Image: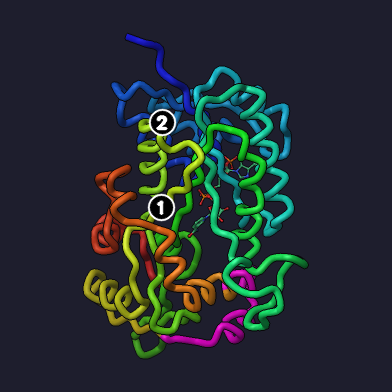
Amino acid sequence: MAEKKIIAVVGATGAQGGGLARAILADPNGGFACRAITRDPNKDKAKALSGKGAEVVKADLDDVDSLKKAFAGAHGAYCVTNFWEHFSGEKEKAQAKNMAEAASAAGLKHVVWSTLEDTRKLMAANDTRMPILQEKYRVPHFDAKAEANAYFAGLPVTYLVASFYWDNLYAFGLGPKKGDDGVYRWAFPMGDKRLAGIAAEDIGKVAYGIFKAGPQHFGKTVGIVGENLTLDQMSEKLSKGLNIVVKYQAVEADAYRGFGFPGAEELGNMFQVYRDFEKEVVAARDVDVTRSLNPSVQTFDQWLVRNKSRISLA
Ligand SMILES: NC(=O)c1ccc[n+]([C@@H]2O[C@H](COP(=O)([O-])OP(=O)(O)OC[C@H]3O[C@@H](n4cnc5c(N)ncnc54)[C@H](OP(=O)(O)O)[C@@H]3O)[C@@H](O)[C@H]2O)c1
């Protein structure tokens, strides 16, 4: 049998890269091998991947030499940054630049860069509907990733544009909270617009589909989504699926930005983009393309059945 093509998976201990690592490992005859990149090979999630057959390699996105070593000899790399660890658009760009430089040095045959759209292109520079953050961004974790596309441009790259993870309900504290009256409520500046959403695990499965398909996706942007749902639709599904009463409250974006939790301004701007530019955000993501690359892509209801036990709503 031909040698397996190694995919170096950044973020293999996280949601996106973890989904890809598990997809590679679940398909032993698929022709690919998983090299899981982590800063800490001794952490449980790294050990779990190693136990399933992944090669675990230590590297840090802030250290380009460590990335060059981690990418050497690989066929491809999955590149993702974690904005939420540092909240800095500039740092995300620096880390993306390091990955692109390492991918180039290793002569990789395929890179998948997990990016997002540049929300600044959706409104005029002097539009006052939302504040400018970090001096130059509307939604830093979107806009900085889009700016970083330029670092990858000379490579055989596929730009992967994901959607809001439904898993944010349990992993990011964004789920509905129980009131004294027993009703669960959640508030977003989403009006009655649809939120493009996806099961986090499905993102890596799509990435695996992209690596398998190869050159036809070079230079292409692939926008992925599981389902576009209004918050009322999601509330109804949660109510039914969890046997509770969930009510959505539409709030103004300014009010949400003022909620005061870390990242409230950032998320206020992001949800406002999802609301004010629903048509553009939805058009940038295609469920049929998603399904063609990951035939088992989940709907919200399917995701809910699988994740019921993880959603312990306070
Ligand atoms: N949440 C959403 O709805 C959503 C939607 C679309 C896009 N995104 C984007 O997804 C990104 C986060 O991806 P995720 O959800 O998969 O992350 P995650 O589950 O929080 O895990 C973060 C991963 O990044 C790795 N990592 C972070 N900093 C690193 C560094 N300096 N060097 C090496 N590895 C590093 C971590 O590895 P170790 O700790 O093991 O080193 C870990 O595997 C964010 O940038 C966000 O903007 C999120």
- Residue lying at 45% horizontally and 27% vertically, measured from the top left: 34
Does residue 15 show up? no
- In magenta, the rendered stretch is 249-267
- Residue lying at 68% horizontally and 32% vertically, measured from the top left: 101
For label 2, being within 8 Å of ligand 1 is answered: no
Q: Which mark is residue 252?
A: none
175 to 105, vertically: above or below: below
Does residue 221 show up? yes
SS of the residue under disc 2? helix
Q: Quadrant of the C terminus?
A: bottom left
Of the numbered discs 1 and 2, the one sitting upstream in the chain is 1
Residue farthest to the top, as pictured: 1
Q: Nearer the viewer, residue 312 or 160?
A: 160
Q: Does 159 appear in magenta?
A: no
In the image, residue 309 lies at what x, y percent? 31, 59
Q: Amino acid at mark 2?
A: Gly
For label 1, being within 8 Å of ligand 1 is answered: yes
- Residue lying at 32% horizontally and 42% vertically, measured from the top left: 293
Distance CA(mark 1)–CA(mark 2) = 22 Å
Residue farthest to the right, as pictured: 135
Residue farthest to the bottom, as pictured: 181
The picture quadrant where one finds residue 10 is top right
In the image, residue 300 lies at what x, y percent? 29, 63
Residue 236 relative to residue 95: left or right: left
